[in-house]
Image (cartoon, coloured by chain):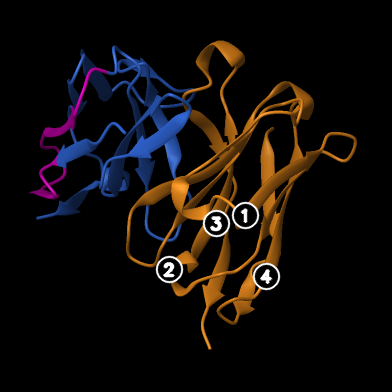
Chain colours: A blue, B orange
Amino acid sequence: EIVLTQSPATLSLSPGERATLSCRASQSVSYHLVWYQQKAGQAPRLLMYDASNRATGIPARFSGSGSGTDFTLTISSLEPEDFAVYYCQQRSSWRWTFGQGTKVEIQ
Amino acid sequence: EVLLVESGGGLVQPGGSLRLSCAASGFTFSSYAMSWVRQAPGKGLEWVSTLSGSGVTTYYTESVKGRFTISRDNSKNTLSLQMNSLRAEDTAIYYCAKLGPASSSHYFDYWGQGTLVTVSS
């Protein structure tokens, strides 16, 4: 099973700052890495798929990069609505796994 | 607009059973694989099970194999999860999630709001 490790666990930033979230896979997932955003009390929402493709309706301040085992989600300038938990996810051999999440909180 | 609405959650004793349902609308239901993903209180996301659009092929995470059964009724646009021999560690919010198109079935593009299952005596 491919294990996804996210870092940091918590990111304390102020609105307007840049957020950089990392996701590392225990073996290569090619470019098939996905990011979700989950706000408190809500269901997860698809943000990025195939590492760098924004889902429908996702603002351009969100960007993704990486391939193989190392991936990054960047929020160029944090808006108040961006403070949430972010999960990465992959599928391998018809098993879907998630990282443990990175919480982006207001400093 | 894609809409997924779960129901059937509740409080059940250890060893008991529960059946979750997910009513889908806004897309051609039979064309997409569907999944259940759960989230224990205060924890991260855990994939539980996936069913192909035809209803023929199933996938389960190891911890629920032999206890949970995923099924669908394409005539009613409904996904179900029969949960038997429930354990305390099955306590979670259970989300119904739609997978992307066949060429991109590695991500969940739409999620329901979830239904809470609590296993406790």
Q: Secondary structure at mark 3?
A: strand
User: Residue type at mark 4?
Assistant: Ser
Residue at horizontal 53%, vertical 76%? B119
Residue position for label 3? B94
Eyeballing the image, is A25 above or below B112?
above
Alpha-carbon span between mark 3 and mark 2: 13 Å
**Number of residues whose C-alpha sits closer than 10 Å to that of mark 1, classed few (under 14), some (14–19) or many (20 or more):** many
**Number of residues whose C-alpha sits closer than 10 Å to that of mark 2, classed few (under 14), some (14–19) or many (20 or more):** few
| Labelled disc at residue B68 | 1
Same chain for the residues at labels 3 and 1, yes or no? yes
Where is residue B32 shown, x and y percent of the image? 68, 25
Where is residue B84 shown, x and y percent of the image? 64, 65
Residue position for label 4? B17
Could you tell me which chain the residue with mark 4 belongs to?
A: B
**Number of residues whose C-alpha sits closer than 10 Å to that of mark 4, classed few (under 14), some (14–19) or many (20 or more):** some
User: Residue type at mark 3?
Assistant: Tyr
Could you tell me which chain the residue with mark 2 belongs to?
A: B
